[in-house]
Image: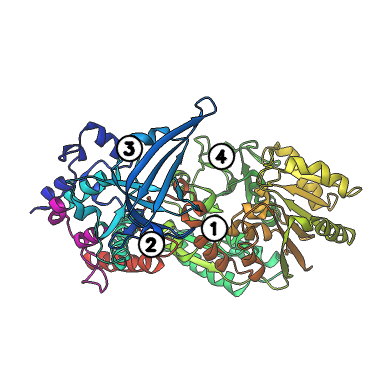
Amino acid sequence: MSSASTTSSLATPVAELPGVGPERASQLARLDIRSVNDLLLHRPRRYEDRRHFKAIKEMQMNEAATTRGKIVAAGLKRWSHGTKSVFEIILEDGTARLHCRWWNLPFMQNYFQVGDDVLVFGKLNSAKPRTIDHPETEVIEAGEEISIHLNRIVPIYPSTEGLPQRWLRSTIARSLDEFERKIPEKNIGQNPTGFPGRAHAIRLLHSPEEMADVEIARRRLALDELVELQTAIQLRRKKLEASARGLPCSGNNKLIRQFLGQLAFQLTEAQTKVLREIRGDMGGAHPMRRLLQGDVGSGKTIVAACNALMALESGFDVALMAPTEILAEQHYKNFQHWLGAMDIHVELLTGSIKTVGNQPSLPTLKTRFSTLFIGTHALIENSFRPGKLGLVIIDEQHKFGVVQREKLLRKGVYPHLLVMTATPIPRTLGLTLYGDLDISVIDQLPAGRAKTKTFVRSEEKLPKVWEFVREKIAEGRQAYVVYPRLDEADEKSGLKAVTKEFETLQKTFSPHRVAFLHGRLRAEEKEKIMAGFHANEIKMLLATSVIEVGIDVPNATVMVVENANHFGLAQLHQLRGRIGRGSENSFCILVYSVKAENGDERLRALERTSDGFEIAEEDLKIRGPGELTGQQQSGLPPFRFANLQTDRGLVERARDFVRETLEKNN
């Protein structure tokens, strides 16, 4: 059969299948099932081994099990003027009786009749009488294809209201029988061991002979998804290399030598190695597309400055985009301090500031030497039109979307790109999120940095924590206190908000000055607070995670994070990076709410290690890629089968296979 007819067969709308009318098609659409292909890839959420049922008498408390029996009684009881109800059926299998109850779901009475043969899955929540509340149930009807629903490992699918499991299971089974031979094979290499063909994998997905078959099928279908993703990523890079010449931006070292000569320290070996990689790209045949990873405090900004100078030396403009005004302003001050004496123009563009300092306006600058533009999202607005953009630097890339990155790149003609992140990226995510970028890692901290000790404490220990902070402030140090929320506290979860705690801490730490920093402040207010904190006039800075990046005050040696269990591990590691930036030992105290279930267990990873990459891998295991990156921000497709938390080996296999295939086809 030709590929065209194969595709059209699997593209058949489900509404055209026997037994699927407009109502069922509408229900399937709510599950994103619109074609036969969608139906065949509808992944079961779990499986029941219905080769062996548990007798009702054998069911144990709090142990999930499947049983079967006939309904001997059913009834609906209402009270509170009909606003509350419980519907109950009683099953019997010859060994004992089982009560199944549904609270405040009176419509459940429409699904059962006395005499029905019913399958039940759930956990007993009472032993006398045996009772399950809100179990999963399935009525076995006479004349049905019993072999689909019984005496085998049975798939249980994600469903929607009004769509019975048995109908969905039967429809998928019939469709698989009809269309299995039309499922095209996808090339994943030369018959790799342990991977069935695609059609066989889909058969195992819906009709496994053993439970182990489920994972075999998932891995094969996950590999197909990852090969498809890697093909798109690597073709994008190939297309760029085929259509764009790299701008000559490697520079002549004149400005860089001057810059490095005025620093009070030497670059680390790791920084020097990364700069060599970047210089090679900046003078290469194709535009640089490089991701620079470095743990907090590893010196990425110095590397970015050197990279900017390469482009500036070559006569090109540079645009550096940061996610917040606070970080953009911090970068502006640093670069003004470093480059101002070298007569390099540095401009700041944010939502509230268009240009800073006694410098010429933008139109004038276009006729002068090249310029370093630093800004926030303002850089992607139509009003920003650099004269000759040679390099784009994006700081904290995970805060931006792929679309925003491309918008800024389109301000020039294929400028070079350096993406920076202080949030270490797990290798699996690096190969998918940033698969079209070359990756550099600064894996060495500058000499002379003090240690940061991390402690996890329950909120009951807060009085002792504040006592410790007071001692450090008395010694002349400064402190950050971070909260997850700005305004409303949540009494139920014990979640605190900055505004509510500000007054309390002002009184607690009087006469020391306490200030409150957050993203809603006007630019001049933020500036005033930061100037006071830098000058050691403000002893304690309360904030939300707005301080996660960009604030560098070496005298701030204490950080207290309240409700720390509401932050991700990588974000806490980022916050912790605001201290330990001087020669004094620093202390990060993570305070968890006693109302949070297992509130401290996850946080212990930060006590154990200061390795950001190890923490990032742990965060990926716990929270998953969606929460780490934000699905919309990341540009990653939604996977049906691939799991970036566990499938690193498959991601690497897909990457290598696609790379080899594209090289052969060149």
Q: Which amino acid lies under the numbered mark 2 shown in the image of this protein?
A: Ala
2 or 3: tag closer to the N-terminus: 3
1 or 2: tag closer to the N-terminus: 2
Q: Is residue 436 visible?
A: no
Please state if 302 lies on the left or on the right of 385 as rendered. Answer: right
State the CA–CA distance, disc 2 to disc 4: 31 Å
| Mark 1 element type | strand
Look at discs 2 and 4 and give the one toward the viewer. Answer: 4
Q: Is residue 348 visible?
A: yes
Look at discs 2 and 3 and give the one toward the viewer. Answer: 3
1 or 3: tag closer to the N-terminus: 3
Q: Estimate the x, y position of residue 345 in percent, counting from the top left.
A: 63, 48
Residue at the disc numbered 2: 285
Please state if 443 lies on the left or on the right of 192 as rendered. Answer: right
State the CA–CA distance, disc 3 to disc 4: 58 Å
Which label belongs to residue 145? none
- The image shows residue 545, relative to residue 523, as above or below, that is below
Q: Estimate the x, y position of residue 511 in percent, counting from the top left.
A: 92, 48
Residue at the disc numbered 3: 111
Which label belongs to residue 420? 1
Q: Tell me the magenta residue range.
A: 177-205
Q: Estimate the x, y position of residue 640 in percent, counting from the top left.
A: 34, 53
- The answer to whether mark 1 and mark 3 are in CB contact below 8 A is no
